[in-house]
Image: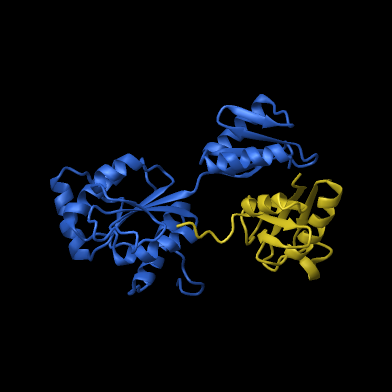
Amino acid sequence: MKHALFDALQAARAGKRPVALITELESGKQVLLDGDGVSGDLNLKESELALAKRALDGDRSGPLEETGLFVHVFNPPLRLMVVGAVHIAQFLVPMAALAGYEAVVIDPRQAWATGARFPDVSLVTEWPDDALRALKPDRRTAVAVLTHDPKLDDPALCAALASPVFYIGALGSRRTHAKRLARLREAGVGEADLARIHAPIGLAVGAKSPAEISISILAQMTQELHGAPPLIKAGAAK
Amino acid sequence: MTTKPDDVLEQAGRWRGQGRKVALATVVSTWGSSPRPVGSQLAVEESGKMAGSVSGGCIEGAVVMEAQQTMESGAVKLLEFGVTDEMAWEVGLACGGTVRVFVERLD
């Protein structure tokens, strides 16, 4: 890869712009697709450019059929917005970072959302619905609502439901969630939206500790992200 | 929180910045089961240091050797690994899949 092209790729990644690097595998010639701009020593046909753009939009790296070209999509990191600067969040945030998420913690209660409890974590102390709207969650974003407090959780869920996020999870027992659903219905939230909320949050792996609960939440996020059915152990399905 | 274990390209850039020769290996296609998806990358530095991965560890050794040639010659390579590979016993994929790996020098 040419020096200048590598620098352009890294600049785009640092600027969190979605870009695609297209390589002619035979020659090694390359072009970087960054918004409407292209740079590099590879000239693409219109049809190839259109296919590459489609791959970028669909977040799918791979060979372009019968062209000898490879499209490598570089998307900005996935995002996780955690509502509630609670004990579980202290485990969930670093684990999510390892899994490639850029996490932000939202909690207007400043006794919770402190730098001492969340070193090097991006903290937002506005009300959850305002905070979420300002952060513009998209379809590469997950939202985990963990406060247990309806006056914080409910506005957070409503704001999350108004966005195309790929995952919404809410902490709380089945009973807590039944009451939550009743409140949200009362507030006019439709059934299709309510069904988007994963609650009790996380896959059922018997999680007890904050770390284990974080694992179950991340596992469920991963499942939703890739649209995979729940794993069934070999031999267990009869 | 910025505890990413390795941003492969960042590491590659750091090596290049230190004046080392660097090559990049990228998984460009897979068939059957394969441990790392398309787009996975391995950066290799001239002494054989690695960042990232292109498999579960089965083919990295062979890729590093090819990468060291590429960082000298500048010639790109398209490698294919699978169980039918003639070196299967040495560097084949135990999972039974096939992967193609593109190797290029970082100028």
Residue A33 locus on image (x, y percent): 61, 33
Furthest residue in direction top, as rendered:
A46
Residue at image position (84%, 63%) is: B86
Furthest residue in direction right, as rendered:
B73
Left or right position of A60 against A83: right
Q: Quadrant of residue A94?
A: bottom left
Residue A59 visible, this orientation: no
Which chain does the blue colour mark? A
Left or right position of A173 against B25: left
Residue A222 visible, this orientation: yes
Q: How many numbered marks appear? A: 0
Residue A107 locus on image (x, y percent): 26, 54
Residue B97 locus on image (x, y percent): 68, 61
Looking at the rendered image, the quarter that the C terminus of chain B falls into is top right
Residue at image position (80%, 41%) is: A26
Which chain does the yellow colour mark? B
Looking at the rendered image, the quarter that the N terminus of chain B falls into is bottom left
> Which of the pair A152/A47 is nearer the observer?
A152
Left or right position of A215 against B48: left
Furthest residue in direction left, as rendered:
A186
